[in-house]
Amino acid sequence: MTAFSILEDRSAWQKDFERRLHAPYTAAGISVAAAERLAEDLRARIGDWTVAEITDAGTRVGHVAVEVADDNGVLAGSIHDLRVDTPHTGRGYEQAARDWAEAWCAERGARRLGIRLTEPAGDLFDGYGVRGQLRARTIGSPSEPLGGVTARPMTPAEYPAWRASETAGYVAGIVRSGALTPEEAARKADRDFEKLLPQGLETPDNTVLVLEAAGEPIGTGWLRHGHLPGVTYGYSLYVQERHRGKGYGRAAMAAGEQVALAAGDSMLMFTVWGGNEVAMNLYTSAGYRVVEEWRSLDLPHGSSRGAA
């Protein structure tokens, strides 16, 4: 019988977890320094997690790490690790651990349960909706302008309208993905923009662009340089609706890559929200690999199996 026991001494599990942190990032082409930064962010939060040992007839078969915390005013659960040791995989322990995590979080008041995937998980989380993906691509050399698209810095006069439009689009993307309610998404958007652009266009290491074709604005882009060592992060890439379907999306990404290279970075990284198939297909066609995928499930979800 599969059983779950909360660990008091987590040192052996933590050592193994930290050993596994870098591999999926470096496999996606991320530098060792950037992968270490991502790993540091996870290490800083490990102390808040609850780790359970999975056993069967007294034999350890793996571990599962969970947490319930406030997320934009709502209690949300997270599966931070679900690991079945190699000799025991494919025997149903993964499903048992998933069910236990759902029950454990639901019993503590979580309204949803999320997981961050860095490698394929088979059909284990097929019932969890895809809420977003982190995509990245190494930039080997400056891309030539495509379709006559050029980029220039945004002017202070253009900033207020862009900020309002960007906030609305950000909220809409989160809601469309199913990650948060409109109210929760609006609170998150306000906090995120105040944190990320406290000085507007003068915020260091940020570039806000106006994309133009034939001298006419067709969209905007927002990039943060040095987000990770050698990595520029693209917070947004927007092509006006009336200009879509003309190849400007790929051209805008090429313009962003040029700006990233000019800032001294060699990789461009984006987040795309779940439900935005057009953007996902664009990133795939442009060679952007999935580094992380976030999925979630609303609770309760028929989770009544032993969360002791």
Image: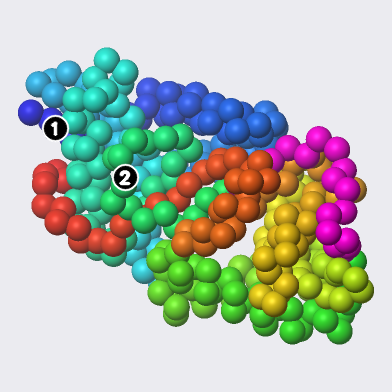
Q: Is residue 219 above or below residue 268?
A: below
Way the structure is coloured: rainbow
Q: Which residue is mark 1?
A: 3
Q: Residue furthest top?
A: 87
Question: For the residue carrying disc 2, how many other residues have a C-alpha within 10 Å: few (<14), some (14-19), or many (20+)?
Answer: some
Using the image as rendered, state which of residue 88 and residue 150 is in the foreground. Answer: 150
Q: Residue at x 16, y 53 (%)?
A: 303
Lateral position of residue 190 relative to residue 196, left or right: left
Q: Position of residue 293 (x, y in %)?
A: 48, 47
Identify the residue at image location x=63%, y=53%: 282
Does the magenta portion include 141?
yes
Q: Does residue 229 show up?
A: no
Q: Amino acid at mark 2?
A: Phe
Picture layout, residue 239 above or below residue 260: below
Is residue 295 depicted above or below 119 in this figure?
Answer: below
Q: How many marks?
A: 2
Query: What crowding class fits label 1: few (fewer than 14 Cα within 10 Å), some (14-19), or many (20 or more)?
Result: many
Q: Which residues are magenta?
A: 135-151
Q: Position of residue 220 (x, y in %)?
A: 76, 69
Q: Secondary structure at mark 1?
A: strand
74 sits left or right of 275 in the view = left
Task: Say if the magenta span includes residue 299.
Answer: no
Q: Earlier in the sequence, mark 2 or mark 1?
A: 1
Left or right: 111 with respect to 150? left
Quadrant in which residue 88 is drawn = top left
Where's residue 283, x and y in %? 63, 50
| Mark in the foreground, 2 or 1 | 2
What's the CA distance linking mark 2 and mark 1?
21 Å
Q: What residue is shown at x 61% (from left), y 68% (from top)?
A: 192
Residue 190 rendering spot, x and y as whole percentages: 59, 76
* Residue tagged 2: 125
